[in-house]
Amino acid sequence: MGKLLIIGCGGVASVAIHKCCQNSEVFDDICIASRTKAKCDAIKEKLEGTTKTKLSTAQVDAGNTEALIALINSYQPEAVLNLALPYQDLTIMDACLATKTHYIDTANYEPEDTAKFEYSWQWAYRDRFEQAGVTALLGSGFDPGVTGVFSAYALKHYFDEINYIDILDCNAGDHGYPFATNFNPEINIREVSAKGSYWENGGWVETEPMEIKRVYNFPKVGSKDMYLLHHEELESLALNIPGIRRIRFFMTFGQSYLTHLKCLENVGMTSIEPILYEGREIVPLQFLKAVLPDPSSLGPRTKGKTNIGCIFIGKKDGQEKKLYIYNVCDHEECYREVGSQAVAYTTGVPAMIGAMMVLTGKWNKPGVHNIEEFDPDPFMDALNQWGLPWEITDTPELVD
């Protein structure tokens, strides 16, 4: 049915490629492109013969708009799925705009030299994408992504207005390392070490990193420590979900992770400011990334589950209503299916579904849009079909 160019070849991209190949009726032709073509070739070789999807590969620098335009013009995809680094979102959007090609990503743009997470840079493309007649779908991962779809679904089917949203991201997996990150170390550590914030009564409340801690009893996982972080979907949901008074994001961390992270911060290894070392500039965080375990290698050694979802409090027919929508994902089951741990799986599957929504025309709205701006129903159905079944309870434990 459609041709898709996938840019990136890390852990999340590997999952998305596997799931696209399972869904050959929609994705009958895929080109996998990355700076390191050998990685693309390895996935192609692994999957050929197991799928009806036609696979090809290409080398491209995702930070080079002209190179991206040349690749898009050569391959002529209907859409580009951006699974590269968040620093490269704008160059890929520029290329899609120049070639009038639909665009999908999983994380908002952030400057390489500043740990700042917001949508302003990408929202600035709204008019240009609308005028070009193509769709840019932002944040089609899990958080952001599925959490936005959960919010739109709750509003459509259960609430007249939603006043409070708490997004809870629990990874109870154990990979056996004293310290490792479950997705790109550079992005993960920048996110966790930044100041936290939440939206309340029309404005942002800023907190110190990891300042606010709660303990929550996650269904099918158990009691875990979680900490308030800033996360990009807070920004878009605060705009797109009517009635919001407060929206927060919490993520779980084990004590070993926090102890190691604090030590690395104290000695300057999490800094993104370049330093001079042996006559050349290096960024400490990028060097740390090079010595930490590759997240894509964690699959065979990770056990346990994730639980990610949203608690909603709002009104229906004038009465207060509470709801909790969540997914539980098993690391070992993910590895058996696609050779990946659950953190990459829970992002890669929604990336494929978002691309499917755009390619099939179920989501077709020229301009730049966050995921909660579309009809959630076909996406929710696809989650159940493609490996991320969700559950609902109207008696959730609340976060104080």
Image: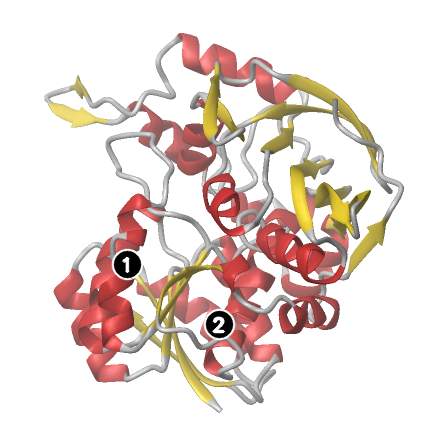
Q: Is residue 340 visible?
A: no
Quarter-of-image position of residue 338: bottom right
- Is residue 289 left or right of 384 when viewed as pictured? left
Q: CA distance from mark 1 to mark 2?
A: 22 Å
Task: Please provide percent x and percent y for residue 335.
Answer: 69, 56
Up/down of 148 relative to 306, above or below: below
- Is residue 57 left or right of 11 when viewed as pictured? left
- Is residue 206 left or right of 166 when viewed as pictured? left
Q: Residue 78 versus residue 72: which sits nearer the camera?
A: 78
Local SS, label 1: loop
Up/down of 238 relative to 72, above or below: above
**Residue at point 13% right, 26% down?**
280
Task: Please provide percent x and percent y for residue 274.
Answer: 20, 23
Local SS, label 2: helix
Q: Are marks 1 and 2 in contact (CB under 8 Å)?
A: no
Which amino acid type corresponds to the residue marked 2 in the rendered image? Ala
Q: Is residue 288 visible?
A: yes
Which numbered circle lies on residue 355?
Answer: 2
Task: Please provide percent x and percent y for residue 65.
Answer: 16, 62
- Is residue 383 left or right of 36 when viewed as pictured? right
Up/down of 158 relative to 95, above or below: above
Going by the picture, which residue comes out furthest to the top?
A: 266
Up/down of 224 relative to 244, above or below: above
Q: Residue 87 versus residue 238: which sits nearer the camera?
A: 238
Which numbered circle lies on residue 35?
Answer: 1
